[in-house]
Amino acid sequence: MMDIRVNGEAERAVATVKGLWKGGGEKTKALLSYRATPLECGYSPAQLLMGRQLKTTLPQQPVTLFPKRPNMKQFKTKQRR
């Protein structure tokens, strides 16, 4: 049986992106900022998918752009709470 929280989190993510779309402005920048923003677990969706931070319009240290895989054991422990 699927966890109800997982379904709720997915619905919330879709609602957030739809809100960004309706707000006008540059949609690609809005989507980039959503993908680069850390979640409750401390990692951004891009970090979980690609293992590194995305390059955004904000200045960053170059070392943050190198691949660094998240600690999956720690991530799964946080997700279970």
Image (cartoon, helix red, strand yellow):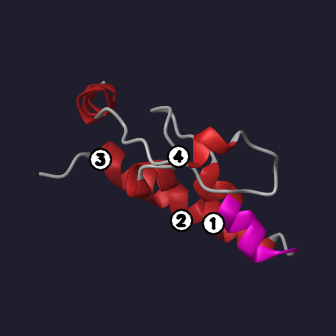
- What is the CA distance from the residue labelled 4 to the residue labelled 1? 15 Å
- What is the CA distance from the residue labelled 4 to the residue labelled 3? 22 Å
Left or right placement of residue 77 versus residue 21 in this view: left
Please identify the quarter of the rendering in which residue 10 is found.
bottom left
Magenta-tinted stretch = 25-32
Left or right placement of residue 29 versus residue 3 in this view: right
| Magenta stretch prevailing secondary structure | helix
Q: Label 3 is placed on what type of residue?
A: Ile
- Measured as percent of width and height from the top left, residue 43 is found at 49, 39
Q: Residues within 10 Å of mark 2 (few under 14, many from 20)?
A: few
Reading the image, the residue beneath label 3 is 4
Q: Say which label, 4 or 1, has the lower sequence index.
A: 1
Q: Nearer the viewer, residue 3 or 70?
A: 70
Reading the image, the residue beneath label 2 is 14
Q: Label 1 is placed on what type of residue?
A: Val
Q: Nearer the viewer, residue 49 or 8?
A: 49
Mark number displayed over residue 44: 4
